[in-house]
Amino acid sequence: MTNPRFSSLTGHVPSKDRIHHHAHTLVANLAADRLLSGTADKPIIFLCHSLGGIVVKRALTYAQTRTAHKVTHEHAIFTHTHGILFFGTPHHGTPKATWLRVLKRLGAAASLGQRSRPSALVSALEHESETLQNTADFFAPLAARFRVFYFYELHPTALPGWFGRGAARRGDYVVPVSSAVPAGHDEAERAGIAADHRGMVRFGDPGEVGFRVVVDALVRYCAEAEEVVRLRLSEVEETGVAEWWWWWWRQY
């Protein structure tokens, strides 16, 4: 299942919905897709590019809270997730000026002129914005449950200057490594991909080093996913029974 509408900031301009709205929609869509395709019991491995990684982090923290009886199908998205591969995800954001140049390149300059106020999306993705800090804080306690791989861009992206049509194009890192690879997650893997922000998920040859590293991670994660999820579900079931007996004992 793919969700290209918020996968990248250098492909299509995302809608103006808030990140948590995208997260709620992702959980609902994924739960429906798994049920209708008969794969609701299968493990999940997310491959996230750019903003998509922020949405997935928010989606998992949301799914983790969906424990009421009528929404356990949404909680299952959390319990069945085994791995996450982040490609150029701005975990700590990027300077506002960089996002403005990215959106200008995509033809959004009409609404982001020099005198215009930045969009809500740009503000949310600004370096260390409140939105990103909250998302990071919510996700941090859960991160150790998953296999995580952070990929960062090794080549700058050609972006237009901000002052007029004739301004020279220059290269810039849309998501610097300091933002693509957050500190404090020692068990996570990390690697650079020899491409710019958009090209890091567009491999032209299966022999490319970056492609081989990605496939290697997927093979390893897939091999262990079913057993990890099975053990996790067993623990959840045992916890549920223990909580029920504790409630029953207190009643009597």
Image (tube, rainbow, N blue to C red):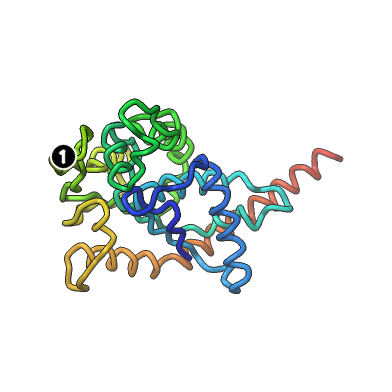
Q: How far across and how far down the image is residue 129, in percent?
A: 39, 29
Crowding at dot 1, Cα within 10 Å, few <14 / some 14-19 / many 20+, comes out as: few
State the image quarter where residue 174 is shown.
top left
Q: Is residue 183 visible?
A: no
Instruction: Determine whether 183 is above or below 210 in the image.
Output: above
Q: Horizontal placement of 161 versus 149: left or right?
A: left
- Which residue sits at x=29%, y=68%? 215
Instruction: Determine whether 19 is above or below 6 in the image.
Output: above
- Which residue sits at x=66%, y=48%? 67
At label 1, the amino acid type is Gly
- Residues 223 and 19: in front is 19
Q: Considering the image in quadrants, where does the C terminus appear?
A: top right
- Residues 151 and 232: in front is 151
Q: Which residue is mark 1?
A: 166
Q: Horizontal placement of 8 versus 165: left or right?
A: right
- Residues 157 and 82: in front is 157
- Which residue sits at x=52%, y=47%? 22
Instruction: Determine whether 195 is above or below 100 in the image.
Output: below
Q: How far across and how far down the image is residue 47, in percent?
A: 38, 59
Q: How far across and how far down the image is residue 50, in percent?
A: 35, 49
- Which residue sits at x=20%, y=56%? 193
Instruction: Determine whether 128 is above or below 85 in the image.
Output: above
Q: How far across and how far down the image is residue 233, in percent?
A: 58, 59
- Residues 109 and 216: in front is 109
